[in-house]
Amino acid sequence: MYAKIISHVFTPAPRRAVIGSEQVFNPTEAQLAALGYKPVIFTEPSEVPEGFYAEIRWEETEDSIVQTWTLAAASDGASGAD
């Protein structure tokens, strides 16, 4: 998967891209890279202690976008647990 961070928002690569004056359906990785998209590295969250939940964060490096996790305190009903 390829994506960009646009205005602090994780944005997956499109299935249709305009390259030059042509529409390209299912662009290649090289075409996406030329448009500024980077490969995404997904990770698993570490164990989440009771009373907390894991929030996804995205970090952009020079050559990829990495999924990271932070712990947030769960308020009443925020974690979805009863």
Image (spheres, rainbow, N blue to C red):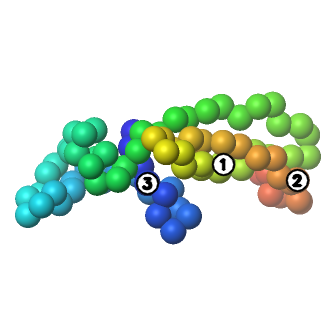
- Seen at 83% across and 36% down, the residue is 48
Q: Position of residue 43 (x, y in %)?
A: 61, 33
Q: Position of residue 4 (x, y in %)?
A: 43, 54
Tag shown at residue 75: none
User: Which type of secondary structure does the marked residue at label 2 adopt?
Assistant: strand
Q: Is residue 82 left or right of residue 23?
A: right
Mark 2–mark 1 Cα distance, whole angstroms, equals: 14 Å
Q: Which residue is mark 3?
A: 4
Quadrant of the image occupied by residue 26: top left
Q: Position of residue 41 (x, y in %)?
A: 52, 35
User: Which type of secondary structure does the marked residue at label 3 adopt?
Assistant: strand
Mark 3 or 2: the one toward you: 3
Q: Which residue is mark 1?
A: 56
- Seen at 56% across and 64% down, the residue is 8
Q: Earlier in the sequence, mark 2 or mark 1?
A: 1
Tag shown at residue 73: 2
Quadrant of the image occupied by residue 30: top left
Mark 3–mark 2 Cα distance, whole angstroms, equals: 28 Å
Q: Are marks 2 and 1 in contact (CB under 8 Å)?
A: no
Q: Earlier in the sequence, mark 3 or mark 2?
A: 3
| Extreme residue in the left direction | 21
Q: Are marks 3 and 1 in contact (CB under 8 Å)?
A: no
Amino acid under disc 1: Ile
